[in-house]
Amino acid sequence: MRNPYLGLPKRAFWRRSVAGLPAEEVDPVSDVPFTIGRTDTIATAGSCFAQHIAKTLVKAGFHYLVTERTPATAHATDENIGVFPARFGNVYSVRQLRQLFQRAYGLFEPVDDAWQRADGRWIDPFRPRIQDAGFPSPEAVAEDRVVHLAAVRAMFETCDVFVFTLGLTETWIAREDDAVFPLSPGVEAPGRPDGDYAFHNFSVLEMVADLTAFLADLRTVNPGVRVILTVSPVPLIATYETRHVLQSTVYSKSALRVVAEEIVRSHQGVAYFPSFEIITGPHTRSRFFAEDLREVTDEGVQHVMALFRRHYLSDDTAAAPRPVRTEDVMSEGTRAAVAERLRSVQAVVCDEEALDRG
C-alpha cells in the first residue's frame, strides 16, 4: 500500500500548518460549505462570545437581524436591544436553545414564569438580567414576554443564516418540568418558593439529541436556513461539579466540540467555525487571553473575526434574497442606531459573571 498521507494538503500536517508558521498565520478554517452575502439576514445566539460576531457583521455592513427593536411594553427598557436579535440574553446550553424555540411556539410553558428578587422587583427566569431594574410585577414580566417571544419567532422564521455559539454544558433545571435556566436559582433571585431545582451537566448524547431536534424544528419554520456552529473559547467562571474548575472547563469545551462535529457531519447546511481552536491552540501560547486567563483580548477577538470575515463574508450581491417580511427586518435608520449601540458597548454582556460576585 502506498503511503496514504503523501500528497495531502499542508493543512493536514502539524509541522507545516501549525508549528512551522507564525501564530498570526495559522488558519484552521477549512471546508466552508457556504458564504454569507450582503443580501443575507444573519441572526446570532449563544454565550457571551457570540456577541463579537454580531459586532463584526454590523461593522462590516452586513444585514444583522434585530427583531426586538424598541421597548414594546410600559415597563420594558431599551437595555440589551441589538445585543442579540431579540432580548433573550445569553443562551449558554443547547437545551436552553431548544426550549427557547419551544416556548416561542407554545410547545413548552414552564411552571417558572417569574421570580422575585430581594428588592421586591420581578425577573424573567429565562433572561434574568435583561434589564437591571427588573419588572414591577409577574404580570409585567408576562406582558413583556409575549412581545419578546413574538420577536423570537420572527428571528427564527426570517433569518437566512443562524449562528450559534455553544458555551456551557453545566446548567440548572426545574425538576418539575425540566425547564433550563441560564443562571441558577439563588443568583439573581431564589426561584419559586415551592420550586425544586437541580444541577445538571449535559452529556454529548443529550446535546446531540437536543441540537438535532432544534434543527428539525427550525427547518419546519425556515427550511432554507443555513447554520454556523462555533464553540466559545472562554473558560468556565465556576463549576458546581466536585472537581477543579479546570477539569470542568476541559470537559465542557471538549464535549461541545464533539457535539458540533457530530452535527456538522450528519446535517446538510450546517458549518463549523473554529473560534475555539483559533484562540486556545498551542500556537498562540495563550497570547489571546487576558491576565485573568479567561477573557479573550481585543487582539484575539480581532484575529478570530478577521478569519471569519475572510472565509464566510462575501461581497456577492448577485443572488436575489429570499423573501423576508419587511416588518421583521431593521430599517436603515434602525440598523444605524443598532450599529452605534454595538460600537459603544465595550464589554460584552455575560450573565455567567454573576456566579462569582461574592
Image (tube, rainbow, N blue to C red):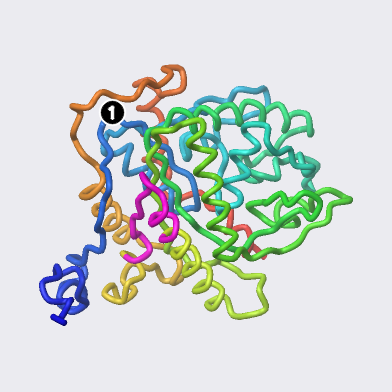
- The secondary structure type at the circle numbered 1 is loop
Q: Quadrant of residue 341?
A: top left
- Quarter of the image with the N terminus is bottom left
Q: Position of residue 152 (x, y in %)?
A: 55, 32
Residue lying at 67% horizontally and 70% vertically, measured from the top left:
240
Q: Position of residue 30 (x, y in %)?
A: 24, 58
Total marks shown come to 1
**Which residue reaches farthest front?**
1
Part of the protein shown in magenta: 261-277
**Which residue reaches farthest right?**
194
Residue lying at 54% horizontally and 45% vertically, measured from the top left:
214
Tell me: 302 left or right of 239: left
Tell me: 59 left or right of 209: left
Residue that badge 1 annotates: 39
Q: Residues within 10 Å of mark 1 (few under 14, many from 20)?
A: some
Q: Nearer the viewer, residue 129 or 95?
A: 95
Tell me: 259 left or right of 24: right
Query: Residue type at mark 1?
Result: Thr
Residue 22, above or below 181 = below
Residue lying at 57% horizontally and 63% vertically, measured from the top left:
205
Residue 353, above or below 76 = below
Q: Position of residue 32 (x, y in %)?
A: 26, 51
Confirm whether the magenta stretch covers residue 295.
no
Residue lying at 60% horizontally and 22% vertically, measured from the top left:
72
Residue 357, above or below 349 = below
Tell me: 326 left or right of 212: left
Q: Nearer the viewer, residue 49 or 12?
A: 12
Q: Quadrant of residue 162?
A: top left
